[in-house]
């Protein structure tokens, strides 16, 4: 991977930062956040402005360019990747390390007095604007909205915003109709005494209307906003997508409906003016509910006194708790996904020793096997197929320049998943196709112990996921090891592979409590720069736990793994496991064998079935 | 315990809430926080205003009185106690439970439109003022400072503010002179570019000047403020305490000193006017550093643009990391404390079966044994001596009305500690003087497993204590049990038994990372209302840990127990322990036997020594 040469681009950007065509007064710094106007994590090519200006294309990062400096903040997953992709014009700011300044502190330190810092008000979330603006103001600087995106002005070959056909998701997948979802939302609005709710996140729009799209790779969403009133529904969406008879039928656009369920379709670009009109017409006490992560531009459209901002929207919270149809769909999707991976690992086992399988070939093969499964739509994220030292690049994606050949001498890490119409998968397995060293097995086993500690944890109702994070690290900590990323994220149901409001991470505190029906990943790891990476990831469902006692009648929860792919026993140092941990592995493998075995049998995949049976042989612990 | 009858008092308070002598306009609600003008947790009798108005005298709680309602917010430690001590005029607000409203939400719900809510600006911390004020304003109400404390106006027999002699602590105890502490503070000030630092917490004043007092029971502090400039030191303190030759000598008040170490002594009551004068005389860029928990009154004395507020002051952080002299002092104090407890438990074992030992007698006996030890000053908090159902009242203190006789049929919980000139102790042991039931042993063993999980935890440098909290609960959670309090708090060195900025609790997120030299408690528990309480508490020192590997060269930490009192093996169900846990107990007891045994021997306490030896017999686990 050679770095992108950005000298000329930065020169151009610094010019437009002073160009009166775009800025009222010259700005001394310009912030390029990661997201789009919907604060999406995964973004369309036309929104990859930070990658365009810097070369760094990981999923998280914020660039700030001043007259003298260009700096990039990103987290532990991307330290290596960012360092590889950016040229010498850029300074890498490693978030989470003690000596790394915050963006605000850094700006205050490098800016000349009374500077103006610009940002696109549609891209920066309101809460970030507020924090940044306050910090800058207290140091004598100003954060200013720059209407025209300055990257777009220098991005001559910027791709078009996608506008692809929609998928209608019927009740057998969603469990709840969009009308019932609107009704539930309105009752939450009534509870909080708000009259309007603005849906800004793409996955929330998709979930609410039981529609899916493909405007953003890996995330089955489409560019749209919605504004829900107590008696009105406005959907802001472009293109001829609303001409599709199936969509019209699904949304009952041509039916005579109670007026409160009549959807008004409006152009995507009219959201700001429409919202400003809503804002201008509010009577006292009429509040408008927005996510505090909605863009500064949309938030400002509502006068401050009328805003009701919350970190998590009622849609975000409702979406996180999967209903029976969604849970069943997720189970089905994970069984199909396991079938594909059994095929893949069986194939790799035969092919790797020949020395012809590269990381890219392996990733493509994984996609090929997945695409053979029913209701397969696309991958749920860029496959991380990494061997040897590439495995230590936490969110690595193989490209021709880095593509490495799998061998019997190196650890292979595959983190991959897919979108099926019935569910979203995300699984990581770490394999060795030769003989792992004692040290590799030792590290793998610590990671496994952490994985089990979370997966088997029993905890009271009302517990927030971040309280479980240390369980995943304890075995690693005991010997001085650790990993620099969180342990788990929420997973959507045929939606974004990363979703809020719950997760398992030492980094969050404001996560919503876990409750039965939520789905998160459990993915501790261990990475040794320049050598190897290990990660073991299952998607797990929060379920009620049976306990001997029941303190204060609170009830308890635990996890049920939805992912059913064998964990390579060759990599396990059984003597480092407790009997309980050993039993967990054996029970898990027994379930993989039964459930996935039946499906492999049904699909006539006999060789993969034999592989599965061999890989799920019980561990025996020497006492 | 019968509740305090508050009908008349509330009537009087509601009258002064409308009395133009005290309030410009009538106020519709009055907030009575727990603390004093220094935001102390333990307060002098003259500051116990919340207890006076409500009857509830636990260490934490906030009362709010409106024209119609009187409500008390407190946490899980005090639910039972508060319910017992308050009459029907009061509504108990159980903090931490899902359905309990915040004070702000409750106020907004019960207040008539455009209400004024009053509070003493010296008592409310600035950060709480800000939060409360904002929430009230957004609902159309106003938070207003009421200069005269309204409780004081109706408290006819309010005791005088204490003004007791000071204790000079010499270098052998403190390790660092006050001049060196001032120098270190000034270098922290220079780093942050502030010109003034205002010391508002009583323990910070005491620590900075290496002085102790006895103005507040259990906390060896004295009423004072200090304002440290880059070249000046002002100490605000009343009475003839500065006449004491030892104090004058210690503070070098009569020596010819470099001017920057010359202490100006001023009356305690002049802090506000002096600080206002400082505030008025600031040149641009001259910042004043205050804790964000300093009172609203003092914070307002500094114009907003000149304030530098942090959650933890540099003194708070420096004070938390004990130096070698302090650590050695803490070790000595804990050995003496263990001697006293060995004597006590040996005595109880003989006396309890006679049926003559009450909770109060046992507490007094504990104090008697402690007071025999060298450098004993006073207790470090009110002894919690509780048997049977009283043990479930987490911060119970025996009083004649509740005083219960210890018996061979009930669990006895003793949470107690002392101030010695060389250190502060805080230890809880749960004992049975007959035969515990299988269920009692089971619960005790889960608590012990939690205690060990924290005490033996190894974690990376930079880890915050709250990340360890779940370790203490895991064994309880596994069978559906839990406890409604944090796991540990910082402990002062001959100072407050509760101190920041570190601790081990699911409730905090903004705690400072643990570092070697910090001292915290490790005290999981289990409480069954109406039956019994179990808690096992040691004070532990953060020390570097040796680990097999050293990820990113970060280094690891663990804990060394300073408390060396046997954990009753009779209460342990050995079969519920892992071999590792069993070894921990045996190693711990071995150390108790060696270290405390030698001191018992030296003090000629042979009977207690025999008790210690018997109580520290190794556990044997049946495989």
Image (cartoon, coloured by chain):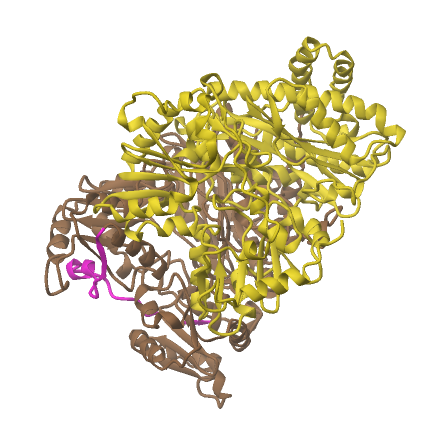
Chain colours: A brown, B yellow
Q: Quadrant of the N terminus of chain A?
A: top left
Q: Quadrant of the C terminus of chain A?
A: top right
Q: How many marks?
A: 0
State the image coordinates of residue B486 (x, y, percent, origin top left): 59, 42
Q: Is residue A29 left or right of residue A34?
A: left
Residue B328 visible in this rendered orientation of the protein = yes
Residue beneath the point at 18% across and 39% down: A88
Q: Is residue A22 left or right of residue B463?
A: left
Q: Is residue A545 left or right of residue A290?
A: right
Taking the magenta stretch, the answer to whether it contains residue B451 is: no
Taking the magenta stretch, the answer to whether it contains residue A151 is: yes
Residue beneath the point at 73% across and 54% down: B3
Camera-side residue of A23 and A36: A23
State the image coordinates of residue A611 (x, y, percent, origin top left): 57, 41
Residue beneath the point at 55% across and 21% down: B422
Camera-side residue of B5 and A503: B5
Q: Quadrant of residue A24?
A: bottom left
Dominant secondary structure of the magenta stretch? loop
Camera-side residue of A606 and B395: B395
Q: Quadrant of residue A96?
A: top left
Residue positioned most to the right: B354
Camera-side residue of B235 and A287: B235
State the image coordinates of residue A384 (x, y, percent, origin top left): 40, 45
Q: Which residues are magenta?
A: A140-168
Identify whether A457 is placed above or below A327: above
Residue A479 visible in this rendered orientation of the protein = no
Identify whether A379 is placed above or below A536: below
State the image coordinates of residue B310 (x, y, percent, origin top left): 38, 44
């Amino acid at each position: 991977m050679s770095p992108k040469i950005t000298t000329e681009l930065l020169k151009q950007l610094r010019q437009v930062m002073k160009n009166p065509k775009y800025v009222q007064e010259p700005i001394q710094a310009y912030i390029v956040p990661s997201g789009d106007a919907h604060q999406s994590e995964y973004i369309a090519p036309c929104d990859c402005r930070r990658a365009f200006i810097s070369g760094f294309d990981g999923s998280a990062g914020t660039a700030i360019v001043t007259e003298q400096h260009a700096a990039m903040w990103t987290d532990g997953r991307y330290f290596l990747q960012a360092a590889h992709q950016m040229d010498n014009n850029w300074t890498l700011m490693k978030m989470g390390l003690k000596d790394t300044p915050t963006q605000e502190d850094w700006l205050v330190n490098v800016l000349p007095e009374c500077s103006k810092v610009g940002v696109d008000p549609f891209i920066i979330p309101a809460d970030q604007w507020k924090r940044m603006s306050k910090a800058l103001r207290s140091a004598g600087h100003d954060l200013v909205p720059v209407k025209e995106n300055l990257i777009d002005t220098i991005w001559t070959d910027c791709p078009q915003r996608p506008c692809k056909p929609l998928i209608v998701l019927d009740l057998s997948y969603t469990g709840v109709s969009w009308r019932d979802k609107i009704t539930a939302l309105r009752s939450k609005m009534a509870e909080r005494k708000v009259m309007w709710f603005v849906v800004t996140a793409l996955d929330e729009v998709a979930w609410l209307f039981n529609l899916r799209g493909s405007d953003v790779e890996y995330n089955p969403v489409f560019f749209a906003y919605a504004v829900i009133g107590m008696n009105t529904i406005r959907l802001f969406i472009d293109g001829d997508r609303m001409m599709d008879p199936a969509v019209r039928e699904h949304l009952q656009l041509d039916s005579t409906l109670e007026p409160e369920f009549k959807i008004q379709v409006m152009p995507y670009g009219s959201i700001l003016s429409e919202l400003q009109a809503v804002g201008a017409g509010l009577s006292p006490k009429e509040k408008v509910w927005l996510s505090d992560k909605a863009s500064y531009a949309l938030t400002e459209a509502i006068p401050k006194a009328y805003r009701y901002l919350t970190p998590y929207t009622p849609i975000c919270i409702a979406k996180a708790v999967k209903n029976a149809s969604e849970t069943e769909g997720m189970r089905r999707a994970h069984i199909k996904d396991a079938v594909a991976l059994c095929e893949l690992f069986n194939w790799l086992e035969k092919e790797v020793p020949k020395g012809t399988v590269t990381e890219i070939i392996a990733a493509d093969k994984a996609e090929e096997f997945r695409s053979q499964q029913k209701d397969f739509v696309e991958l749920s994220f860029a496959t991380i197929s990494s061997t040897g030292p590439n495995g230590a690049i936490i969110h690595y994606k193989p490209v021709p320049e880095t593509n490495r050949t799998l061998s019997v001498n190196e650890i292979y890490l595959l983190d991959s998943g897919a979108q099926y119409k019935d569910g979203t998968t995300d699984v990581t397995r770490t394999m060795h196709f030769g003989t792992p060293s004692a040290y590799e097995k030792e590290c793998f086993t610590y990671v496994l112990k952490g994985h089990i500690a979370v997966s088997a944890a029993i905890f009271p109702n009302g517990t927030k996921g971040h309280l479980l994070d240390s369980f995943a690290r304890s075995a690693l900590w005991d010997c001085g090891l650790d990993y620099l990323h969180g342990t788990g994220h929420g997973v959507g149901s045929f939606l974004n592979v990363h979703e809020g409001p719950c997760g398992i991470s030492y980094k969050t505190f404001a996560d919503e409590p876990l409750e039965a029906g939520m789905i998160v990943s459990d993915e501790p790891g261990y990475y040794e720069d320049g050598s190897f990476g290990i990660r073991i990831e299952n998607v797990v469902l929060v379920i009620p736990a049976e306990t001997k006692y029941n303190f204060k009648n609170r009830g308890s929860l635990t996890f049920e793994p939805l992912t059913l792919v064998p964990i390579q026993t060759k990599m396990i140092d059984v003597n480092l496991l407790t009997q309980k941990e050993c039993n967990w592995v054996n029970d898990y493998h027994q379930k993989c064998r039964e459930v996935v075995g039946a499906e492999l049998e049904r699909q006539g995949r006999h060789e993969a079935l034999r592989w599965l049976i061999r890989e799920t042989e019980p561990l025996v612990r020497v006492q």
